Amino acid sequence: MNKDQVEGRLEEAKGKIKQAAGKVLGNKKMQAEGLVDQAAGKVQKQFGDTREDVKDAAKNAADKL
């Protein structure tokens, strides 16, 4: 697991909490910010997943040499 995967998951969780808090408080702006945070976290996590996949593929290719 790399830094981007961890930070992405944290950002997603933060967004879910912010969205829920906005819903409870009736704050539409906070809810929207939570959705944005969740989307940003998903993108960052996917980037980290891709980096990890590339690293694994390169390692496997090097092992076959």
Image: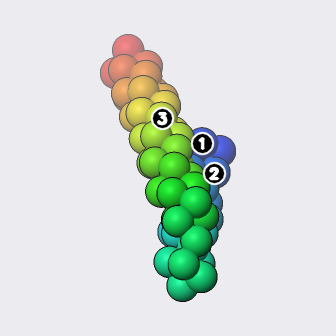
Q: Is residue 21 above or below residue 10?
A: below
Query: Is disc 2 in contact with disc 3, using a CB cutoff of under 8 Å?
Result: no
Residue 50 shown left or right of residue 29 in the figure: left
Q: In terms of depth relative to the viewer, which is nearer, 8 or 62? A: 8
Query: Is disc 1 in contact with disc 3, using a CB cutoff of under 8 Å?
Result: yes
Residue under label 1, please give it: 4
Secondary element at image label 2:
helix
**Screen quadrant of the C terminus:** top left
Q: Categorize mark 2 by other alpha carbons within 10 Å: few (<14), some (14-19), many (20+).
A: some
Q: Amino acid at mark 1?
A: Asp
Q: Is residue 20 visible?
A: no
How is the model colour-coded?
Answer: rainbow
Q: Is residue 1 above or below residue 17?
A: above
Q: Position of residue 4 (x, y in %)?
A: 60, 42
Secondary element at image label 1:
helix
Q: Is residue 41 visible?
A: yes
Q: Categorize mark 3 by other alpha carbons within 10 Å: few (<14), some (14-19), many (20+).
A: some
Residue at x 42%, y 27% (from the top left corner): 54
Q: Amino acid at mark 2?
A: Glu
Residue at x 46%, y 40% (from the top left corner): 43
Secondary element at image label 3:
helix
Query: Is disc 1 in contact with disc 2, using a CB cutoff of under 8 Å?
Result: yes
Residue 6 shown left or right of residue 65 in the figure: right
As measured in the structure, the alpha-carbon distance from the residue carrying label 1 to the one carrying label 2 is 5 Å
Q: Is residue 54 above or below residue 41?
A: above
Mark 1 and mark 3 lie on one chain; the one further toward the N terminus is 1
As measured in the structure, the alpha-carbon distance from the residue carrying label 1 to the one carrying label 3 is 7 Å
Residue under label 3, please give it: 47
Q: Which mark is residue 7?
A: 2
